[in-house]
């Protein structure tokens, strides 16, 4: 009797086994995938570690094929290569290296191919300076590629070659050296000295202790260097102050004894250069915190010191700001040399006024500061008055020292130090505004006085210019403002000559072309002088243009016609007339009739023709 339900049950059991097996297989595959993934990651990490290791070692690594062709390389620094990589990748050994060296390497390349055994050998390469020695280790990998590991053994080779050479060769080499060379025996006595050593210390040094000959009692010579089995390098200074670099290297004898070869190279010059370099660095460090002109601290120091002192322990903390009055005007009028003299004088005043304070700094072109820790406002104000008094007592030519000064004090720790600094500056600027006008007027008067002393210009010339200008101004019906300007220009038109050298101003005879070019600059110098003064700045353009010509051939800008300021055109006519009708060191005066005729000739070229006509009419009425 058949039992269908049993057959069905068997069918399910059969496929259950199959499904179970498949699931087990899938799980196993999944485990394998994870396992091999981990292996792959491990391989990548190992490869990365290997690359890092290879990149860090000092050896040179090359990969070549069996045809002796360079395929790849690994080196810490490309500068260690015999030749750039572009010169050897893809090329054979004998195309890259010298013939003798290539022949040696090719031989061992063939040996490793034939024997599959690691090959180790040495070779040498010459460059422009010396011969370098290398140890090569060839390894054949599974891809039939050859890994060449190259190590620089030059230092080791020098020692080895020294040991291998005969005494005769040693002597011939050492006797040719300019360095001092001697060999000490195992009992630390000199058994050989080269000619340079004998010339320096005498023939009787053989058999003596080098301490007696070289050092005496003034410098320590490390006696332990004798019988050393290592190469030792030292610096020693001998009795006469000469500094040597001492290199001591062992010499091994067949009987087991060890002597030493000592090489002394005079490095006194190098030590001198080293000292000079050290001094230079110290000077640079000094200059990084000091002002070169005055020797005071600079802004970098001031800012750092201000932050350092800005603590509770230093309260009250006062700041003084000082500014030199009229520095720009002094520079423009008398040159930067005189301006620098003002700055250096003020630096000395500040140092003498507060000798115990070490925080005086020049923080700008004309600005100075003093930091006063543990100093209240009353004490700071007293110091300001003392500095002002000391400045007045310094009498220097051509410009007296004048300053604007301000101070403020931080009393409480929560106060902003930058705000204290700003308040001190504002006080100083208020004082500067109050005193500025009198200082500038004083400097202008000094310039006029000096100009009269240095040149052919006289006070009478200025007075005549002013009278002629005002007379002509009335004829031209100038406004009151124009009349005031014209009066000033008549006196100050040549103020820029203060910047012209004396030998040009006082020269008897015509100027050379080069001297004339220098003289022409007085217009621009005068422009900058009056421009720096707010009270005189409005006449700057007129002074700049008073040597321009009606036809455009004047200087300094070459403008023409009515583009030239009207007052400049007036002054040029009056100045020419007065110069022609009065004696000068380089020529005699001409009559007013001749001068008027000369003005007519130059009318329409040098001078404004309309103004010339008015001037001639005006001057004719007064004569």
Image: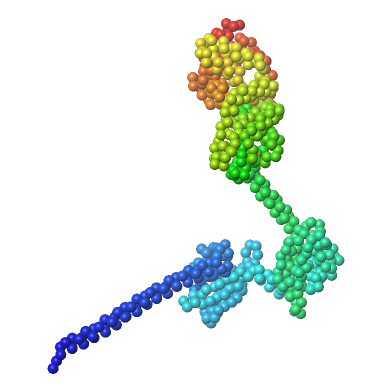
Q: In front: 557, or 527? A: 527
Residue that sits furthest to the left in the current view: 1
Q: Is residue 227 visible?
A: yes
495 with respect to 62 (left or right): right
Q: Position of residue 208 (x, y in %)?
A: 84, 68
Q: Position of residue 267 (x, y in %)?
A: 73, 58
Q: Position of residue 250 (x, y in %)?
A: 73, 72
The correct choice, above or below, for 342 with respect to 29 in the image is above
Residue that sits furthest to the front in the current view: 412
Q: Is residue 366 visible?
A: no
**Quadrant of residue 413 in the image?**
top right
Image quarter hosting the N terminus:
bottom left
Please state the total of marks drawn on the protein image: 0
Q: In front: 178, or 530? A: 530
**Quadrant of residue 211 in the image?**
bottom right
Q: In front: 103, or 306? A: 306
Q: In front: 419, or 66? A: 419
Q: State the residue at coordinates (71%, 52%).
A: 275
Q: Position of residue 149 (x, y in %)?
A: 56, 72
Q: State the residue at coordinates (70%, 69%).
A: 231
Q: State the residue at coordinates (57%, 78%).
A: 119
The correct choice, above or below, for 117 with respect to 323 in the image is below
Q: State the residue at coordinates (54%, 14%).
A: 483
**Quadrant of residue 536 in the image?**
top right
Image quarter hosting the C terminus:
top right
The correct choice, above or below, for 163 with respect to 501 in the image is below
């Amino acid at each position: 009797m058949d039992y269908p339900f049993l057959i069905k049950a068997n069918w399910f059991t059969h496929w259950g086994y199959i499904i179970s097996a498949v699931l087990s297989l899938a799980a196993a595959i999944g485990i394998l995938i994870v396992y091999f993934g981990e292996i792959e990651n491990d391989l990548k990490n190992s490869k990365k570690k290997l690359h890092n290791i290879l990149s860090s070692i000092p050896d040179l690594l090359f990969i070549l094929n069996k045809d002796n062709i360079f395929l790849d390389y690994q080196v810490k620094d490309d500068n260690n290569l015999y030749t750039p990589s572009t010169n050897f990748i893809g090329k054979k050994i004998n195309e890259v290296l010298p013939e003798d060296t290539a022949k040696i390497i090719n031989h061992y390349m063939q040996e490793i191919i034939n024997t599959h055994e690691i090959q180790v050998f040495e070779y040498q390469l010459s460059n422009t300076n010396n011969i370098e020695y290398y140890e090569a280790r060839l390894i054949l990998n599974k891809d039939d590629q050859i890994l060449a590991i190259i190590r620089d053994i030059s230092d080791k080779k020098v020692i080895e070659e020294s040991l291998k050479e005969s005494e005769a060769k040693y002597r011939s080499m050492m006797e040719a050296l300019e360095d001092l060379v001697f060999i000490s025996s195992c009992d630390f006595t000199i058994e050989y000295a080269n000619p340079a050593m004998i010339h320096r210390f005498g023939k009787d040094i053989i058999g003596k202790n080098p301490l007696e000959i070289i050092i005496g009692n003034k410098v320590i010579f490390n006696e332990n260097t004798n019988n050393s089995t290592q190469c030792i390098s030292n610096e020693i200074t001998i009795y006469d102050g000469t500094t040597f670099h001492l290199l001591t290297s062992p010499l091994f004898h067949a009987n087991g004894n060890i002597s030493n070869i000592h090489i002394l190279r005079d490095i006194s010059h190098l030590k001198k250069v080293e000292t000079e370099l050290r001094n230079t660095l110290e000077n640079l460090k000094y200059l990084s915190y000091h002002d070169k002109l005055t020797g005071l601290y600079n802004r970098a120091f001031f800012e750092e010191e201000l932050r350092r002192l800005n603590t509770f322990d230093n309260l009250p903390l006062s700041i003084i700001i000082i500014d030199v009055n009229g520095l720009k005007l002094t520079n423009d009028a008398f040159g930067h040399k005189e301006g620098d003299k003002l700055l250096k004088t003020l630096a000395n005043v500040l140092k003498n006024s507060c000798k115990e304070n070490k925080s005086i700094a020049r923080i700008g072109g004309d600005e100075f500061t003093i930091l006063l820790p543990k100093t209240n406002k009353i004490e700071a104000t007293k110091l300001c008055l003392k500095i002002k008094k000391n400045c007045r007592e310094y009498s220097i030519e051509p410009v007296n020292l004048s300053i604007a000064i301000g101070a403020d004090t931080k009393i409480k720790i929560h106060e902003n130090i930058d705000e204290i600094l700003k308040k001190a500056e504002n006080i100083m600027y208020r004082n500067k505004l109050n005193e500025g006008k009198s200082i500038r007027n004083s400097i202008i008067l000094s310039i006029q006085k000096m100009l009269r002393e240095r040149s052919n210009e006289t006070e009478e010339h200025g007075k005549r210019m002013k009278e002629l200008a005002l007379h002509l101004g009335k004829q031209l019906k100038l406004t009151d403002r124009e009349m005031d300007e014209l009066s000033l220009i008549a006196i100050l038109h040549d103020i820029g000559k203060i910047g012209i050298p004396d030998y040009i101003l006082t020269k008897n005879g015509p100027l050379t072309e080069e001297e004339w070019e220098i003289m022409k600059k007085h217009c621009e110098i005068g422009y900058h002088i009056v421009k720096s003064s707010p009270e005189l700045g409005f006449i700057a353009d007129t002074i700049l243009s008073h040597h321009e010509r009606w036809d455009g051939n004047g200087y300094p800008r070459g403008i023409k016609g009515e583009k030239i300021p009207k007052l400049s055109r007036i002054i040029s006519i009056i100045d020419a007339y007065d110069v022609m009708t009065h004696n000068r060191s380089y020529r005699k005066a001409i009559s007013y009739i001749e001068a008027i005729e000369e003005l007519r000739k130059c009318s329409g070229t040098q001078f404004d023709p309309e103004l010339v006509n008015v001037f001639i009419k005006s001057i004719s009425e007064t004569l």
